[in-house]
Image: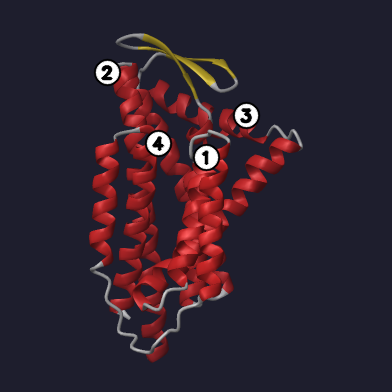
Amino acid sequence: MINENKNVFLILLILSLFTGATIEFSEGSTYVGIFLILAAAALVTRIRLTETRTIESSKLYISIGTFIAFADLFYNFRTNSQLGTLDTMVFFLGISLIAFGINNPQIRRMGEFGAYIAAIFTFLYLIFYTLFGALEINFFHLFNHYFVLLPTVTIIKLAGIPIEVIATETVKLSGVEDMTIVIGGPCSGLYSMFLLIGIVAGYSRIEKMNFSKTLYLLGFAVVVAYIANLVRVIILYIAAYSYGTEVMMSVHTHIGWIIFAIVAGGIMYIMNLKTEISINQNKL
């Protein structure tokens, strides 16, 4: 069991590094992105499974995964658009399905876990972003204003930093330079929340956890993701106040996936701990 828990933790770390690499390639440093990809590849070799049974490869999963991955790339190439968050996760879903169809226990387990995460993220994204947008439901502006902007502004004011709300998702901050900061898009923290929900759900399916424990961990993951995002936004305020816009944007690029990796690792540790406690109790 210890070996399985270690493997799951390594898989989670690999996925965190992969997520960080995609963010770095699109918004940050290409060199950092390459380093994270290489680190993820190195960790793959550390996965060790005690399972010795042969798992036959599945041409169906490989075919579906290949189609999804190439269709996503082809669409963006034809429309001359850059790979966005949804494109990255759809491509990740395709790669995960390919891995799930390969006759190798280590790669197959990574593929299964990755497919759960990517599929759940894509499903939630299509509901909250695509469907809500088509129905003109003003969810994100309200969420960003009442659940992100106002709480973080209240906290930062207690630290004595001059900040003022000037619009639904915009604040004015006076520090080393006067600037306006828009709290929108990734600042909502929903991307990380979707990923953590996918991680918990995928882990629950793989380890066959009971329904009540899964619901508890899902609720816990949502709360932790929300608090972690507030911390992230507060750090951005402090960076902007102390060092200016350029430093804040640099921190904005890197800090998101770092906090995600720490939070996701903590949640995975708790899930593994609860699993071990449950097994020990059953043995007694």
Q: Cα distance, mark 3 to mark 4?
A: 24 Å
Q: Residues within 10 Å of mark 3 (few under 14, many from 20)?
A: some
Mark 3 = which residue?
141
CA distance separating discs 4 and 2: 24 Å
Apparent side of residue 77 relative to residue 34 in the rendered image (left or right): right
Q: How is the image coloured?
A: secondary structure
Q: Where 6 sits versus 88, above or below?
A: below
Marker count (numbered): 4
First-in-chain label (2 vs 3): 3
Question: CA–CA distance between discs 3 and 1?
Answer: 31 Å
Residue bearing mark 2: 243
* Alpha carbons under labels 1 and 4: distance apart: 16 Å
Position of residue 56 in the picture relative to residue 52 (left or right) = right
Asked if the residues shown at circle 4 and circle 2 are in contact, with their CB atoms under 8 angstroms apart, the answer is no
Quadrant of the image occupied by residue 99 = bottom left
Where residue 169 appears, as percent x and y from the top left, is: 56, 23
The residue that label 4 is drawn on is 26
Q: Nearer the viewer, residue 265 or 75?
A: 75
Tell me the kind of residue under disc 2.
Answer: Tyr
What kind of residue is marked 4? Ser
The image quarter containing residue 248 is top left
Image quadrant in which the C terminus is located: bottom left
Q: Amino acid at mark 3?
A: His
Among the two numbered marks 1 and 4 on one chain, the one whose residue lies closer to the N terminus: 4
**Dot 1 corresponds to which residue?**
77
| Residue sitting farthest toward the right | 135
> Where residue 156 appears, x then y in whole percent?
40, 24
Which corner quadrant of the image does residue 160 belong to? top left
